[in-house]
Image (spheres, rainbow, N blue to C red):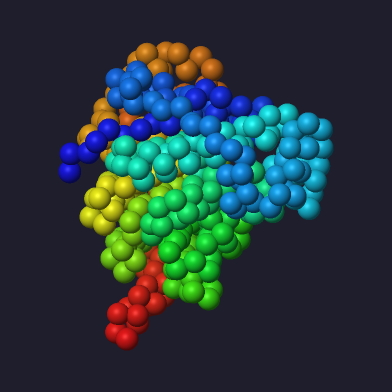
């Protein structure tokens, strides 16, 4: 399983995707991750690829012209609100670089897709991407343009490849699911905290696609306070889905907000989940797709203690290396501890600070198993036909 080099799509301009100082979506986490990898000597200049430039028509493959124009206006007229387009809300306020910054994120993910599909690299990672809540005609949940849907559409139009989309963000991947809900060539799979108490509320087990696309959307809404064991047990079903769908390429979204320290969700996973999931996806990419794998970022709101470690571990796996263990680079800690509002973790493994044992553990495991059974019944029945 020796891979060709893996591309790390990056430009410091990605950091311009910035709502305001107090906003929970903070792309400083990109720089934190990049510098953590560099100080561990795991990322070099040769690994880094700048996003290529694309025509603005790229946006039209998913988004409505009217909405694109509104995003341009919001950039020029900031502060401004276009509520029917989801812009200027508390979640997704306007900011001056809104259009350019969002378009750049899109070009990053399409660059990753192009490098992988043209077999210049086996795997490519764009941690700036993964904005799965963007809809064709509106912004939602911190997401303006849906870079994932655009990258998948790019793969469909230019390579006619079958795409398996795997979304491990704690929130449902609603925007991506919506864009391919009737498409049998794009199978979307989302594992997320149940929408009972969490945005966006969708992603129920019964959402399975429509028309030709029926049977090509899978949703695993897990219980609040789910821990590593049950998250990973649920994730195992994706192996069965891959066997049923037989993808040509995997596009994955690596939101790191299922971690117990994340301030916006109620899942209770540790870094162990973010070490294990990439290994399983990596294996599937080689098993079904000759290694073709496009990995993207996503949510993750503990930008100091969680996201840099989670995404660095992802990068290690994409490069066929072992996970980092033991102490974190002193150089990185020294530089960033001065700015961090919390004590930074000194080891790659969680020290289980603030980790509370969940008394309902067994009940949650069983609830998730029953839910999974219900989702997978579809494939079981399909096989028996
Ligand atoms: Zn999320």
Rendered residue at 36%/46% (across/down): 117
Q: Where, by quadrant of the figure, is residue 49 drawn?
A: top left
Give the number of marks: 0
Foreground residue, 367 or 187? 187
Q: Left or right: where does residue 46 sit relative to residue 173?
A: left
Where is residue 249 shown, x and y percent of the image? 35, 53
Rendered residue at 81%/42% (across/down): 81
Q: Where, by quadrant of the figure, is residue 6 drawn?
A: top left
Q: Left or right: where does residue 295 sit relative to residue 246?
A: right
In this rendering, does residue 346 appear at all?
Answer: no
The quarter in which the N terminus is drawn is top left
In this rendering, does residue 106 appear at all?
Answer: yes
Where is residue 196 shown, x and y percent of the image? 59, 63
The quarter in which the C terminus is drawn is bottom left
Foreground residue, 373 or 183? 183
Rendered residue at 48%/71% (across/down): 213
Q: Is residue 328 shown above or below 78?
A: above
Foreground residue, 336 or 378? 378
Q: Is residue 267 shown above or below 181?
A: above
Q: Is residue 267 shown above or below 384?
A: above
Q: Where, by quadrant of the figure, is residue 376 drawn?
A: bottom left
Where is residue 245 shown, x and y percent of the image? 34, 66
Identity of the residue furthest to the bottom in this view: 385
Q: Left or right: where does residue 78 sit relative to residue 103?
A: right
């Amino acid at each position: 399983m020796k891979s060709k080099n893996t591309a790390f799509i990056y430009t410091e301009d990605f950091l311009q995707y910035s709502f305001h100082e107090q906003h929970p979506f903070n792309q400083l986490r990109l720089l934190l991750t990049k510098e953590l990898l560099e100080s561990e000597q795991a990322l070099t200049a040769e690994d880094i690829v700048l996003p290529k430039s694309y025509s603005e028509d790229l946006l039209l493959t998913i988004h409505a012209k009217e909405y694109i124009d509104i995003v341009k206006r919001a950039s020029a007229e900031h502060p401004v609100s276009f509520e029917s387009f989801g812009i200027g809300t508390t979640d997704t306020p306007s900011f001056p670089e809104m259009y350019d910054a969002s378009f750049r994120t899109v070009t990053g993910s399409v660059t990753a897709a192009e490098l992988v599909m043209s077999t210049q690299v086996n795997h490519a990672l764009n941690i700036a991407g993964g904005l799965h809540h963007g809809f064709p005609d509106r912004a939602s949940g911190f997401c303006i343009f849906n870079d994932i849907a655009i990258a998948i559409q790019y793969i469909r139009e230019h390579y006619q490849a079958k795409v398996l989309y795997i979304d491990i963000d704690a929130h449902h991947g609603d925007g991506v699911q919506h864009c391919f809900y009737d498409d049998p060539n794009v199978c979307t799979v989302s594992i997320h905290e149940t929408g009972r108490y969490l945005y966006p509320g969708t992603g129920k087990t019964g959402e399975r696609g429509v028309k030709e696309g029926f049977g090509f959307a899978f949703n695993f809404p897990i219980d609040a306070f789910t821990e590593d064991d049950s998250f990973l047990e649920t994730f195992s079903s994706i192996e069965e889905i891959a066997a049923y769908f037989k993808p040509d390429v995997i596009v994955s979204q690596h939101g790191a907000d299922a971690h117990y320290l994340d301030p916006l969700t109620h899942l209770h996973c540790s870094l162990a989940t973010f070490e294990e999931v990439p290994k399983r996806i990596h294996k599937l990419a080689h098993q079904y797709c000759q290694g073709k794998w496009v990995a993207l970022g996503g949510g993750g709101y503990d930008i100091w203690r969680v996201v840099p470690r989670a995404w660095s571990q992802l990068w290690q796996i994409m490069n066929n290396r072992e996970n980092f263990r033991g102490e974190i680079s002193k150089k990185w800690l020294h530089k960033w501890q001065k700015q961090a509002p919390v004590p930074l973790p000194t080891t790659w493994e969680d020290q289980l600070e603030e980790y509370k044992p969940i008394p309902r553990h067994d009940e949650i495991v069983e609830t998730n198993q029953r839910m999974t059974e219900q989702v997978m019944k579809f494939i079981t029945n399909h096989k028996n036909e």
